[in-house]
Image (spheres, helix red, strand yellow):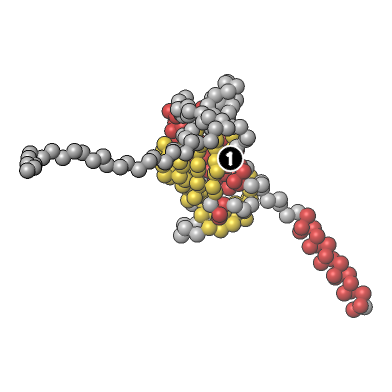
Amino acid sequence: MMSVRFPLALMLASLLGLAGCVHSPPIPMFQLDAGTPEVPSKKAGMQVLLGPVTVADYLQRETLLQRQADGSLTAAPDGRWAGSLAADIDQVLLRQLSWRLDSQRLVLAPGNPGFTPEVQVLLTISRLDSGPQRPAVLEAQWRLLDRAGQLRDSRLVRLEEPHAGTAADQVRAQSKLLQQLAEQLAAAVKPLEGQPVAVEAPRKPAAANQPAKAKEPQPPKIPMAAPVRTDVEVFRF
């Protein structure tokens, strides 16, 4: 009897475990929201190169992180990112900037062959997170380079956005911060539109197939003897 009961008990335990796995709720997946940007009305518009956009190492993972009251970070048990957070950030900024600048000519770094931007936006995002009891926080720095690669603007940014505490509302708040960042970037980029293209002065073409003439050696200069006058008279007897 003992040999019969043991397999039956093992079978029941396996069935109960399988039932528990089947009924476990799925983990929600989240993406950043780009808002409702309109499609630019201009087919051309300002040429802008967005990037490289550098994202902090701790954000390059699928886990949705939660900032705790003591400043530490823990993995959220009820949510994760659906794909790459860095790629989501790129797309939110690209769509927002394109709409705000009314231009279809925005390209993500490294750019396309033959594309010459009027402005390049270099962006570093060092923080983008929130917690059940902590607001969403975005910390970043941007630099703007003109056609000649000269630095035209540089700024440090820190933005905060409150939320209701749920994972979904935290993602909404983080998305709102990126939209605010794009608004500030557009305001800084717009004045650089229509920069004059620097034109180099034409150089005189060198004569083709004509070797440079070597200087001929000059003959040594010999000082000429000048006659010496004398007032001495010579008498002969």
Q: Residue at x 51, y 31 (%)?
A: 206
Question: x, y percentage for residue 113?
Answer: 63, 35
Q: Residue at x 48, y 29 (%)?
A: 203
What type is the residue that disc 1 sits on? Ala
Question: x, y percentage for residue 184?
Answer: 45, 35
Q: Is residue 125 found left or right of 4 in the rendered image?
A: left
Identify which residue, 222 or 31, lies in the foreground.
222
The N terminus appears in which quarter of the rendering? bottom right
Q: Residue at x 61, y 32 (%)?
A: 114
> Furthest-bottom residue in view?
2
The C terminus appears in which quarter of the rendering? top left
Identify which residue, 221 or 194, lies in the foreground.
221
**Residue neighbourhood size for the residue with mark 1, other residues' Cα within 10 Å, grouped as few (<14), some (14–19), many (≥20):** some
Q: Where does label 1 land, which residue?
A: 109
Could you tell me if residue 230 is visible in this image?
A: yes
Q: Secondary structure at mark 1?
A: loop
Question: x, y percentage for residue 69?
Answer: 47, 57
> Furthest-front residue in view?
237
Kindly indicate the quadrant of the structure image that contains residue 45: top right
Kindly indicate the quadrant of the structure image that contains residue 191: top left
Q: Residue at x 76, y 58 (%)?
A: 20
Question: x, y percentage for residue 171?
Answer: 57, 44
Could you tell me if residue 37 is visible in this image?
A: no
Identify which residue, 150 or 98, lies in the foreground.
150
Q: How many marks?
A: 1
Q: Is residue 107 above or below residue 8?
A: above
Kindly indicate the quadrant of the structure image that contains residue 168: top right
